[in-house]
Amino acid sequence: MFSTLSDRLTTVLQGLRGKGRLSDADIDATAREIRVALLEADVALPVVRGFIAKVKERAKGSEVHQALNPAQQVVKIVNEELINVLGGETRRLNLAKNPPSVIMLAGLQGAGKTTLAGKLAKWLKGQGHTPLLVAADLQRPNAVTQLQVVGERAGVPVFAPEPGNGVGNPVEVSRLGIEEAKAKQHDIVLVDTAGRLGVDEEMMKQAIDIRAAVNPDEVLFVVDAMVGQDAINTATAFRDGVGFTGVVLTKLDGDARGGAALSVREVTGQPILFASNGEKLEDFDVFHPDRMASRILG
Ligand code: GDP
């Protein structure tokens, strides 16, 4: 991901080297090239506009004029503004003062929710937590079994509906899952919910009902970073529907252009907490805006 954007930005910024003083015209030309590179990487237009405006304003100011190496100073500004677009500081998971903490996962089918549930469970376990996975995706035929498989791999138990115990009713399964966590002293509950191939009213209502029933400490919107601008429309629909407190980007290992990753924070106003970059349970990490910006700038 980001390889084209990364190459383009590096080339643009390298073009400034050896120029000594930078005129406003130099900065305008550079900003134009950065703008094109971001748009071609599928970054949402309002995000591009805001980004370019900030870079231009700062690059024309005294921090560049007075710098010993103006070109390097512009690189520093672009880096800092990229970090800002990606959310600034690393945002830690919000956990309840009185366990169990409840984390609800929402997103479209195929976004990587169930895989992410296993990754997050494994990571939390590694941090000394005692998570419980709750299989409340009753839409996709194999989702419960798939969660049981990833749970087993992660070494984390899974609460799944049983006859007479929530079958067909994801809200009830979620509620019972929390009861189970309390009874068995799990300190974190991860609720995997159903997605559809596209945003639909019934799915959103179900997510809203689950959210109301389990009162989560975090609702994480899981989004496939490979789907480009569409990810932004989906994110907006989830923000306005069930609402969410954080984002997880998946499939960052793909070779898509990466615009969704760069847009989702600004467009939804919610921070990116984690990133998934592969199919294995270990392919997962806390999202650090500064590291991602460095990766983009090569
Ligand atoms: P869900 O429908 O949202 O629960 O999505 P799944 O967890 O079933 O994932 C859908 C597909 O994407 C599966 O084939 C996963 O193996 C794959 N997948 C999930 N996360 C990643 C990732 O970070 N990178 C890659 N390359 N594939 C992933």
Image (tube, rainbow, N blue to C red):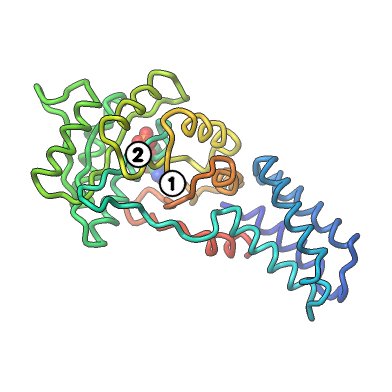
258 relative position to 98: left or right: right
100 w.r.t. 27: above or below: above
Amino acid type shown at disc 2: Leu
Amino acid type shown at disc 1: Val
Disc number placed over residue 105 in the picture, else none: 2
Residue, x 46% and y 46% (percent of image)? Answer: 249
Q: Earlier in the sequence, mark 2 or mark 1?
A: 2
Under circle 1, the secondary element is strand
Quadrant (top left/top right/bottom left/bottom right) for the C terminus: bottom right
257 w.r.t. 234: above or below: below
Q: Which residue is mark 1?
A: 248
Q: Quick one: which residue is furthest to the top in this view?
A: 202
Residue, x 16% and y 29% (percent of image)? Answer: 161
Place of residue 209 in the rendered image (x, y in percent of width and height, measured from the top left): 31, 25
- Circle 2: is it few (<14), some (14-19), or many (20+) Cα within 10 Å? many
Residue, x 88% and y 62% (percent of image)? Answer: 26
